[in-house]
Image: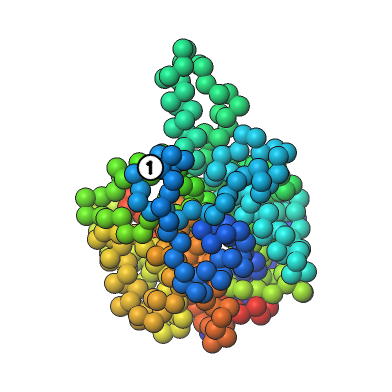
Amino acid sequence: MTPVPAKEVTTEARGRPRTDRAVITAWSAVSPYGLGRAAYAEGIAARRPTAAVPDPAAWQTPDAGACLVPGFDIRQILGRAGTRTMDRAMGLAVTAVRELFEEAEADEHPVTRGTGTALVLGTTLGSAASQQNFSRASFVGDKPYDVPAQLMPNTLMNSPAGASAIRFGLKGPNTTLAGGRPAALLALAYARRLLAAGRAERALVGAVEEYSGARSWLERHSRGADEEQGAPLGEGCAMLLLEPADTLPEDRPALAELLAIDVRVDVTGDLPGTLRESVRHALAESGVTPDEVWAAAGGGLTGAAGEAERTLLTEVFGRQAADRAVCHELIGDTASAQAAFQLAAVLVAASADPASAGRAAVVTSVDREGLVACGVLRLLGGAR
């Protein structure tokens, strides 16, 4: 099924063409497989697990295993200039943006920066470690105001997005969305609205999550009574480049078209039912039937909600589709970055199978707090 192109209208406020069709044209990742798109693609294709025992002295966590970005030293990777006060979440986001720009240039499809480029980043609450350390300083110091003032910006959840924009000259809209596990799908929906309204010419969209002792303890104590820790905690940042299909440069290939994103909150206490309705609505909006779906990637939440998600995807789309793009079992529970890594895993799997071109992919995400999201993509196989 070929999507019907949306009509172009003019947005007088910005003077940019308005379009309802948005395509993913590039992506990159900083993951437990290493830095960049190639490292993630190789690891996912080989289905290579990444869990290892974290150093107790360095991390001060009770975790028996964690999926960490190997050798991630911010100052060694990004240089000494402007990195003295960077925390881990900020470093992961900045590095992922850098990788996307450098890989695009290496592919001879450089990405324009400046006022036309937006950045939309998903998170849960920013850096839990920075917030905890700053708050702790106000209690252990001689006075409540004896805190490391230079680290105060790190306590704000929008610091990774802000630091990335400053470092790379991204002067378009800069937005951070706190959405838990579905954060990347919320970010994609937000970025698509920016493009549709003519507020940006392109958007870098992704989500970031760091590993830390603070996050480990928060996760341990917020887990539901019916949940067990399935995969160990992971970390990383995945970034996608979203551009209007109607204004795409002639030499830039498109990997997937964003057809629909449905976001809703479970207010009835029936999370499985809310997810089923979200999937149904997203398919209806996109005009995709279940038999057209080549891959269906779930978020990997444990407990009753996660089991209901896996059951639904298998029931509606078949086991083969539900098993095509696996990532959380390999790179760990990356929380707010999970949906971004799911999207990247779908693109990795599709790039290895020419039969995926023209078919659809479904990505779902469920948060234990009741937020549910479902995205539907048309896989394009690099076609325009």
Residue drawn at (38%, 42%), measured in percent from left and top? 61
In the picture, the quarter occupied by the C terminus is bottom right
Q: Residue furthest bottom?
A: 355
Residue drawn at (44%, 65%), measured in percent from left and top? 49
Residue drawn at (44%, 77%), measured in percent from left and top? 324
Closest to the observer, 344 or 170: 344
Which residue corresponds to mark 1? Answer: 61
Where residue 378 appears, as percent x and y from the top left, is 54, 76
Where residue 278 appears, as percent x and y from the top left, is 37, 65
Q: Amino acid at mark 1?
A: Thr
Asked if residue 63 is positioned above or below residue 320 in the image, the reply reads above
Asked if residue 308 is positioned above or below residue 167 in the image, the reply reads below
**In the shown orientation, is residue 229 left or right of residue 241?**
left
**In the shown orientation, is residue 214 left or right of residue 347?**
left
**In the shown orientation, is residue 126 left or right of residue 265?**
right
Where residue 172 appears, as percent x and y from the top left, is 69, 49
Circle 1 — which element? loop
- Snapshot quadrant of residue 166: top right
Where residue 250 appears, as percent x and y from the top left, is 77, 74
